[in-house]
Amino acid sequence: MLLYFPLLFFAGVYIPLPVMPQGIQTISSYTPAGAAVQALSDSWAGTVPEMSSLFVMAVYVVVAGLLAVRLFRWD
């Protein structure tokens, strides 16, 4: 929960992203939820998602996957 609610904030769930200050919008684009919302918004609008959003999500997948392989082994 300590990560979930801040991620929702940076994704624009509580306050729409266009209303937020520019600094928070920039931080939001580097969080997994913010990048996912941006990619989905672009797709919904009929445009190709920005490569930066897809790259941010891919980096989080790789890092989380490596952590999972390292930390969650069956005995």
Image (cartoon, grey):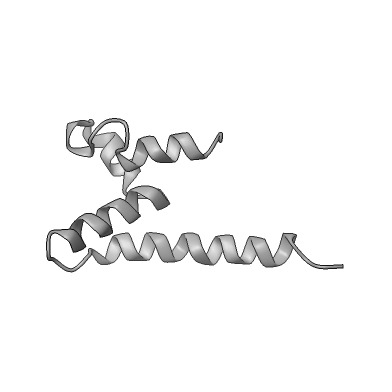
Q: Nearer the viewer, residue 51 or 42?
A: 42
State the residue at coordinates (18%, 68%). 48
Q: Residue at x 27, y 67 (%)?
A: 51
Pick out the residue farthest to the front.
44
Which residue is found at the position 28% from the left and 43% from the top?
A: 26
Q: Is residue 5 above or below residue 26?
A: above
| The one of 7 and 56 positioned closer to us in this rendering | 7
- Residue extending farthest to the right is 75
Residue 18 screen position, x and y as percent: 17, 37
Quadrant of the drawing holding the C terminus: bottom right
Image coordinates of residue 40 in percent, x first then y, are 26, 58
The outermost residue toward the left is 46
Question: Left or right of 73: which side holds 36?
Answer: left
Q: Position of residue 69 (x, y in %)?
A: 69, 67
| Residue in front for this viewpoint, 70 or 73 | 73
Q: Is residue 43 shown left or right of residue 29? A: left
Where on the picture, by quarter, is residue 45? bottom left
Quarter of the picture holding the N terminus: top right
Question: Looking at the rendering, which quadrant does residue 2 occupy?
Answer: top right
**Tally of marks:** 0
Indicate the position of residue 72 as horizontal and vertical percent values: 74, 61
